[in-house]
Image (tube, rainbow, N blue to C red):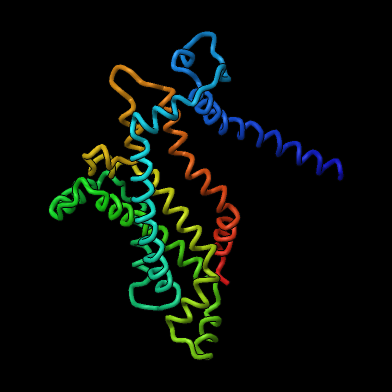
Amino acid sequence: MSKQQWTTKLLIALILVPITLFVLLPLFWAVSISLKFEGDISKLPITYLPSPATIENYIVAWYNVGFSHYFVNSVVISVGAVIFVVIMSIMTGYSLSRYQFKGKGIFMIVLLATQFVPVAVLLIPLFNIFNNLNLIGSRTSIILANITFQLPFNAILMRGFISSIPLELEEAAMIDGCSKTESIVRILLPILKPGITTVAAFAFIGCWNEFLFSFMFLNDPKKFTLPIGLKYMQGQFDINYGALAAGALIAMSVPIVLFGYLQKHLVTGLTSGAVKG
């Protein structure tokens, strides 16, 4: 390896190492606090490692605070919304990719423009709509709200994935006797798997982290999601930092595991949707 290559690698390392430490330090501190006894968290001098360590904070967060219910609610809401977002994104993306129709460009601009609309602007209209439908206080209202805000971006994303797949593959399947629907199901969808994985992952993370809709539309503590549960752990006069850190790590665990498991598919999906084939 030449001297210039060594110098380049050294410079990259000097840049990436501080950034990595900056990103991982808060996570390390949260893990450390979650494993400490309550009296050791604010004790001076500061100890960076728990000694002794305890899982009591996780037990308190999961059973006493109610994170077992919050976790299930977040999973139900996120999975329910993602299923509809993926299906509707495929349908919308396919239409935008394969068909030419009047107003197509304007429609795509409108889809993209919805990403600039603040969530808070639509809280009152959505609240009135869901209230008239008797959905306030139900998880259905959160699922519908999540679908509304996750669909436009993911539909545009799915269009890019579908555009990267040659139309000739579907036409060849139809020449061999497949109907339009069969060509999509048997030919397009298997090739589109990385794109579907990417869209599902982005939609899931968006739904999992959603706070404002759940905070405004849910009034039963048994239906709270994880972000709402974390918010109510911060009392007016007292905060159990150990349990709060444990709850935050529980909430982070699913996205971390999801991205770790789907990392290869996400990279494939993003690159395949970047260029039209």
Looking at the figure, which quarter contains the C terminus? bottom right
Pick the residue in front: 212 or 241. Answer: 241
Please tell me which residue is depicted at 57% across the width and 66% down the height of the picture.
275
Looking at the figure, which quarter contains the N terminus? top right
Q: Is residue 27 above or below residue 201?
A: above
Please tell me which residue is depicted at 41% across the width and 22% down the height of the picture.
241
Please tell me which residue is depicted at 39% across the width and 30% down the height of the picture.
61
Pick the residue in front: 168 or 2. Answer: 168
Q: Image check: 119 left or right of 86?
A: left
Please tell me which residue is depicted at 33% across the width and 40% down the height of the picture.
69
Q: Image check: 18 left or right of 112?
A: right
**Residue 58: % across, % down:** 44, 29
**Residue 137: % across, % down:** 21, 45
Q: Residue furthest right?
A: 2
Q: Image check: 211 left or right of 273?
A: left
Q: Is residue 67 above or below residue 136?
A: above
Q: Is residue 192 above or below residue 200?
A: below
Q: Image check: 74 left or right of 98?
A: left
Q: Quadrant of residue 165?
A: bottom right
**Residue 10: % across, % down:** 76, 36
